[in-house]
Amino acid sequence: MKPQPLKTLFYGITHEHAPGKLETLKRMRDDFEIVAIVDDSPRKSPMYRDQVWDPAGYRIVSEAEAFDMPGVEVVFVEVTNRDLMEVAGAVADRGLPMHCDKPCGEDFAAYRAVVEKCRARNIPMQIGYMYRANPAVQFCQKAVRAGWLGEIGFIEADMNHAYNHDNYAEYMSTFEGGILYSLGCHLVDMIEPLVKGELLRASSVVRPAPFDPPGSRTSGAALLEFPSTEALIRTSSQMPGGILARRLRIDGSNGTIDLCPIERFDGGNLRLAMTLQKPAGGYAAGSHVIDFGALSDRYADQLRELAQTVRGEIPNDPAGYDRDLRVHRWVLKMCGLEDR
């Protein structure tokens, strides 16, 4: 028998990813049925107000009404960044599975408290690190795990854009780590499976991107040092090419992978270049181009996995809680916030 779509509460319209995620859910009606959208716009926390979303056809409720509806099976937490952990905590208190957007707050203890609530009750808590389901990123992680590239010495990752929206610089600057905190968290999550051991040291700089107002926190770079690997992370709000300039490069003792762009939705195929000194993984020595075809949606595969987990079709991985905690601890250390 075909499973019924999960009764879904979409909590929040102010997160940067909220409009895109809502559009994805509209195309996933076999997995999710949105029973209501919670309007969090009256909140006073800093918000990114230049995005457009279309709630047409959905029931809109206030936050006071949010948890009064019976039968909700999963919640999407899409409030503005500052408020994510407050709402995620309320969802965890009610024992509901959730997809919670990133980043997970500037106070690590508050995030850990929410995670431990979920762990204690085996509640799925999926964090919105959208590259986890990216086929090219998964290939990179497979190649590293299998040792095709040898020992990994250096990783370079950047995640930039050129939105040029009116209040973006103002919004990013409300966070001490600025854009490095907001976007760099995706990169930290992406490289976590590529390195061995704990993060030893992190140094960073956050400053205005070119053409942004003085005092803006819209350009950032960080060097992360692990026992045998260094990783350079870069973020900017003023990068010509936007998302098509985003890159992941992995250098190992037996080869290199260069993925640029990390994702694309312009109709072109997603490809990476891999060069091997010696044969590995069924690939001959020399240069290769791996083609993953055209991508149609950045969120769908990850959200489908959430639906399968909530329905019990696949297990809720207990190791996921620790991975998410480790990633966010590294993010905060990168931003100089690990002691909060």
Image (tube, rainbow, N blue to C red):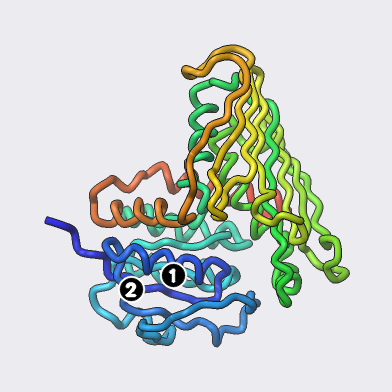
- Whether residues under marks 1 and 2 lie with C-beta atoms below 8 angstroms apart, the answer is yes
Q: Earlier in the sequence, mark 1 or mark 2?
A: 1
> Horizontally, is 131 left or right of 181 in the view?
left
What quarter of the picture does the C terminus occupy? bottom right
- Separation of residues labelled 1 and 2 (CA atoms): 9 Å
Identify the mark at residue 22; answer none if there is no mark.
Answer: 1
Viewer-proximal residue among 288 and 71 = 288
Q: At 54% across and 84% down in the image, what residue appears?
A: 41
Q: At 36% across and 83% down in the image, what residue appears?
A: 57
Which residue type does callout 1 highlight? Leu
Q: At 78% across and 49% down in the image, what residue appears?
A: 204
Q: Write down the residue under mark 2.
A: 34
Which residue type does callout 2 highlight? Ile
* Residue 199, image x, y percentages: 65, 38
Identify the mark at residue 128; answer none if there is no mark.
Answer: none
* Residue 203, image x, y percentages: 78, 45
Quadrant in the picture for residue 60 = bottom left
Mark 2 crowd level (few <14, some 14–19, many ≥20, 10 Å Cα): many
* Residue 330, image x, y percentages: 63, 46
